[in-house]
Image (cartoon, rainbow, N blue to C red):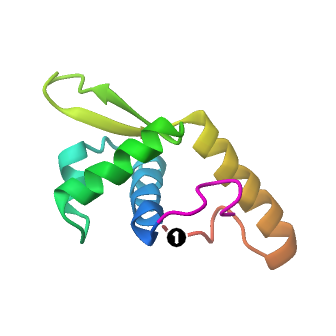
Amino acid sequence: MDKKLYSGHALITYDLILDVLKAHLENRNLTIKELCTGSIRSTLNTRKHINLLIDDGWIVLSNGVHDKRHRLVNATDKLIHLVDGLLESGGTQNNVSHESMHI
């Protein structure tokens, strides 16, 4: 997974990705503020990793619908397709299905 996803970076990166994917699966908005406050790392360090994920095309920022001051964090199609592929290949190899995955 590292080679396809995000090689050479800290575990905080994977924590952030899981938080973004969880919000995506729950069909709820996730703000940068929520993502940073949910992290065990400093806001500055967390924001650095968010920027790396944005630069590599795994997540994208958008403005909030009701409040344009809120910056929302969303999974990109690139990330969603990668996770779907991992779930499909893992489901045949490890008996993992979409229903049994709890993020």
Q: Residue visible at 18% across and 64% down?
A: 42
Magenta stretch holds residue 5: yes
Point out residue 39 in the picture as x, y percentages from the top left corner. 26, 65
Using the rendered view, name the quadrant where residue 88 is placed.
Answer: bottom right
Would residue 41 appear left or right of 22 to someone viewing this image?
A: left
Give the residue drawn at x 86%, y 68%. Answer: 92
The quadrant of the picture occupied by the N terminus is bottom right
Q: Specify the amino acid type for callout 1.
A: His
Instruction: Provide the residue designation for mark 1.
Output: 102
**Is residue 29 located in the magenta-colored stretch of the structure?**
no
Is residue 75 in sight in this rendering?
no
Residue at x-position 37% and y-position 42%: 51
Magenta segment, prevailing SS (helix, strand or loop): loop
Mark yes or no: residue 39 visible: yes
Q: Where is residue 79 in the image (x, y as percent from the top left)?
A: 59, 44
Residue stretch rendered in magenta on the structure: 1-9
Query: Would you say 99 lies left or right of 17 here?
Result: right
